[in-house]
Amino acid sequence: MSNLVSGPHTHARPTVPWIMGQVMLALVPTTLFGIYLFGFPALNLFVLTILTAVFAEAAGLAMMGRPVRPFLFDGSAILTGWLVALTLPPWAPWWIAVMGGLFSIVIGKQVFGGIGQNVFNPAMLARVMLLVAFPLQMTTWINPIPMFSANAPSFMDSLAITFGGTIPHLDAVSSASLLGNLKTELTLGHKVPEILIHSHYSIWEAFNGWTSGSLGETSALLILLGGLYLLFRKIITWHIPVSMLGSAFVWALVFNLINPDRYEGVDFHLLNGGMILTAFFIATDYVTSPATPVGKIIFGIGCGTIAYVIRTWGAFPEGVGFAVLIMNALSPLIDHYTRPRIYGRLRSGAPIEASK
Amino acid sequence: MKLFHFRGGVHPEANKHHTAHKTIRVMPMPKMLYVPLQQHVGAAAEPQVEIGQHVLKGQLLAHSQGNISAPVHAPTSGTVVAIGEFSAPHPSGLPVRTITIEADGEDRWIECNTPADPFELDPAEISTRVGAAGVVGMGGATFPAAVKLRLGMRSDIHTFIVNGGECEPYLTCDDRLMRERSIELIDGIRIVMRALQPKNTYIAIEDNKPEAIAILTEACQPYDNITVVPVPAQYPMGSAQHMITTITGVEVPADGRSADVGVLVHNVGTVVAIHKAVRHGQALISRIVTVGGGAMTEPQNVEVPIGALLSDVIEFCGGFKEKPARLVMGGPMMGLVMPSLDVPVVKGTSGIIGLTLDEITPKPTMPCIRCASCVDACPSGLVPLEMASNIRSGELEGAIKFGLVDCIACGCCAYVCPSQIPLVQYFNYAKDELAAQQRAKHKAEETRKLVETRKQRLDAEIAARAAAAAARKAAKAQKASEASA
């Protein structure tokens, strides 16, 4: 009975593994949909990325002399691998999965000292590294070919795609992503409305996800569903998703109003690419985002704005990954300037004047 | 009435239903009573009885010394059998000076000095009587009540808040007190009002105690300057600062006291003790204690003489149903782990809570994932995760920057932490370190002063000696010249 422990002697129930589990639960709909939409190669990619991440985590822990079991089962490595997989082109070869899993855990997390210590979001770090290093594989987008449908690859076919690195009839099954296509066409002097008609852009498909894109980023609807679940469970707060999507919304609206021939509309920016997934699942990463509500809003606005700027004027069609990393780097600074005011003190730290 | 919000706070499971409906039982007098001389904030009391001396119930055992202190009194009549060291009700179990009394079974009161009409008493006389009765803050802070009253009289108090918040889980001693002793409570309130002359008096009760609210609303009908205010059940509502903010919307300055903003807060138990002290001249020698927790056979509220051992109280309540995983004095949020059952109940003992393993939900500590739940939960606007990481790396200055000295140790941060980091323990450690550093600095300063004074004295002595020698020489020379002349 005699143990020198301070209060409290009771705890709220949530634990780290529970939180990670809830996030994974929220990712289930969009993940299942992505695997269904892109078939067995997507499943291979998903499993492989997670296995590599978990292996890398275990190896890293062992090398640092940390207890492997409790940390491995906190679920954070699985979640990181999961998120990396969702941002990959669904038929990417095995080594993209392995490099993504390794890079996110080893460079993104363990070299900083493990869970809670990293500056950058591991999944986004891996995504950006892969995009810069392997632009071809990272921009090979597959049209929806649902599992078990006529043209879908069988499981054996999928092994050839994943491990053989050859996609049969590539031209028939792939197309540029909307974001990529738009960027190319704009440089050729075409106008946004024409490009969208030519590339058969449909708001409804962008919303429900029946379109090409990263494994888990196509269905805004299902991601939104998962995001709302996280809000409902109080795993995340509204600040980052709302401010990130809100700022992208405002920029898209303003520039689209100024010149609709040059700048895409609001729906295009919000529903395509990684915008929604990032807003709910990646920018909200506890470790790499600010701690206070005001800080979170600044962070979200930064993410949304930088993503919009890169998409609109940058060299890359998709900018959310870069946006998150840049804002990750600014998080400590944001935290420094957005500390809550201490009870009985002014923002400066000086005691308040007694007011009777 | 318009209420104000404070940031943060948590809503732990209240667990008050086990005891809230049960009438307070009075515990029979145990044979031996162990009365520690330090049951309050400030200097320990100084014994003024001798071993072997027979004392009456309510008789002064040890008087207060210094500005901030409180006396202690005999909880029953009997013989002083020891004045020495006895285990304190503190996690360390370290011994403190304690007077041990063997009860004679007669429980005979000393003659009490009762005023004809307490409402004729001078305010200063009221605080003197409260001080003489050894009344201290019974919500757990144990600050001498008379000192607070005197401070209040000097500061022109406009609002007197009677704290019936009782936000700690499990505890219902204040709830039962408000329900069963409303007449005494109102009388105590009116006595304090006589001393302070506040414009407004509020009895603030968390809205999870509807019966107490109803009873007291009824009881203060005749007094239109006393208002019962239901406040939201939100831990740590019972913290005086946060209660002041809830009711008045004003914050207490970080370097000040509540009196500086014209408010004075007393716990309901303290006010009833003030009533007994002033109306009946009785010292504070017993209190109501919630005996609870999943390990208790018969959770209930008991009126316990100060100095009774925890083992006596628990035995009276039917003992343990199972061995408690943790025995806590106070509530489960801020209470102290008890080293054994052989420590006495003191004036600040609001609860004796035997928690089962399931109730304390112990889990291994994991690294911080910066989820910032602690930042959201902190009612004082601190950044616990940054404080902890600074303390871990030995950066006390850094921890202070994030609010170490403003921490009220309420435990909200550690309660919500999904990594089960013992944040309060970190902060207690750092506060201790800080105090030690300040003591060392103070000591070095004092030493430097002493050395300087000594040097000045020695220099002065040398100068004086030299002057004397010079004077003698001069006198001699003069004599010689006179002689030669």
Image (cartoon, grey):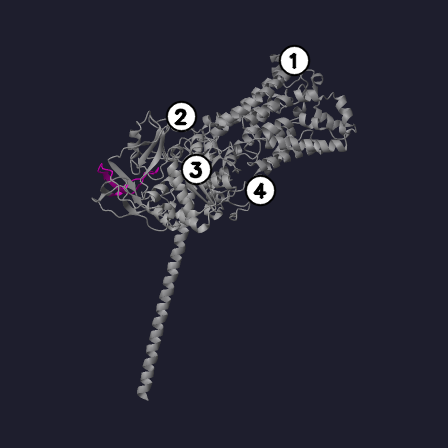
Residue B7 drawn at (x, y percent): 52, 37
Look at the numbered disc 3 and give the secondary structure of its residue: loop
The residue singled out by tag 2 in the image is B358
Chain letter of the residue carrying label 3: B
Secondary structure of the residue carrying tag 4 is: helix
Does residue A144 appear to the left or right of A2 in the view shown?
Answer: right
Q: Which amino acid does label 4 sit on?
A: Tyr
Q: Is residue B199 visible?
A: yes
Q: Name the residue under label 1.
A: A152
Spatial CA distance of label 3 from label 4 is: 49 Å
Q: For numbered disc 2, what is the local secondary structure?
A: helix
In 3D space, how far apart are the residues under numbered discs 1 and 2 (Cα atoms)? 52 Å
The Cα–Cα distance between marks 1 and 4, rounded to whole angstroms, is 53 Å
Which residue is located at x 50 percent, y 29 percent?
A60
Is there any visible trace of residue B382 in the rendered image? no
For disc 2, the neighbor class at 10 Å (few under 14, some 14 to 19, many from 20) is few
- Looking at the rendered structure, the kind of residue marked 2 is Asp
Q: Which mark is residue B220?
A: 3
The answer as to whether the residues below labels 3 and 1 share one chain is: no
Q: Which of marks 4 and 2 is in front?
A: 2
Nearest the viewer among B433 and A90 is B433
Q: How crowded is mark 3: few (under 14 residues within 10 Å), some or many (20 or more)?
A: some
| N-terminal label among 1 and 4 | 1
**For mark 4, what is the residue?**
A337
Q: Residue furthest left?
A: B52
Q: Which residue lies furthest to the front in this view?
A: B222
Residue B64 at x, y = what percent?
Answer: 32, 48
Position of residue B460 relative to residue B479, above or below, is: above
Kindly report the distance in space between the C-alpha atoms of the residues bearing marks 4 and 2: 41 Å
- Three-letter amino acid code of the residue under disc 1: Ala
Residue range (magenta): B83-107
Q: Which amino acid is tagged 3?
A: Cys
